[in-house]
Amino acid sequence: MSLKYDPNLKYAKSDEWARVEDDNIVVVGISDYAQDALSDIVYVELPEVGTQVSAGEVVGAVESVKAAADIMSPVSGEIVEVNEELNDSPEILNEDPYGAWIFKVKASDLSELDALMTAEEYEAYNATREH
């Protein structure tokens, strides 16, 4: 099975993706690689709206039948929205990893995204990893 990479997103080595919306809002989810490695996702621990976070800070977790993985914020700022749908349907992260977002953060410094990888770089990075 070949994994999908969205060229419009930026990727962290910790397998989150980030997409910038209006007003410095960064939408965050997990990559196709991450959901594939985790397999059947059964629970998502969402961050709290209003929480101030730093880039690289653990803000939640995704649990599957196989493992648990931390979710980190790719940028510093304030959590402004979480995807409540994941409380009842965490499996949507498996079904549509780039459509199903986890949280949105109002970034205090969008240049932090420059530290993330392009889809091409992330795909090359994943090729070097054990899956």
Image (tube, grey):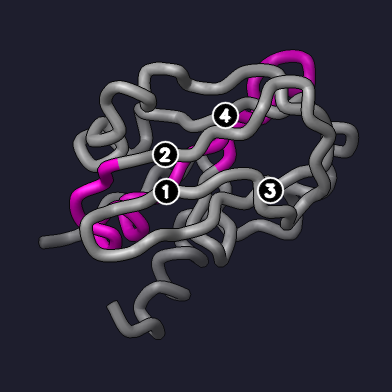
Q: Earlier in the sequence, mark 4 or mark 1?
A: 1
Going by the numbered disc 4, the residue's amino acid type is Phe
Disc 3 from disc 1: Cα separation: 16 Å
**Which residue is identified by label 3?**
74
Disc 3 from disc 2: Cα separation: 18 Å
Going by the numbered disc 2, the residue's amino acid type is Val
Residue range highlighted in magenta: 18-42
Disc 3 from disc 4: Cα separation: 11 Å
- The N terminus lies in which quarter of the figure? bottom left
Disc 4 from disc 1: Cα separation: 12 Å
19 falls in the magenta region: yes
Q: Which mark is residue 62?
A: 1
Q: Earlier in the sequence, mark 4 or mark 2?
A: 2
Q: Position of residue 54 (x, y in %)?
A: 82, 47
Q: Are marks 2 and 1 in contact (CB under 8 Å)?
A: yes
Q: Earlier in the sequence, mark 3 or mark 2?
A: 2
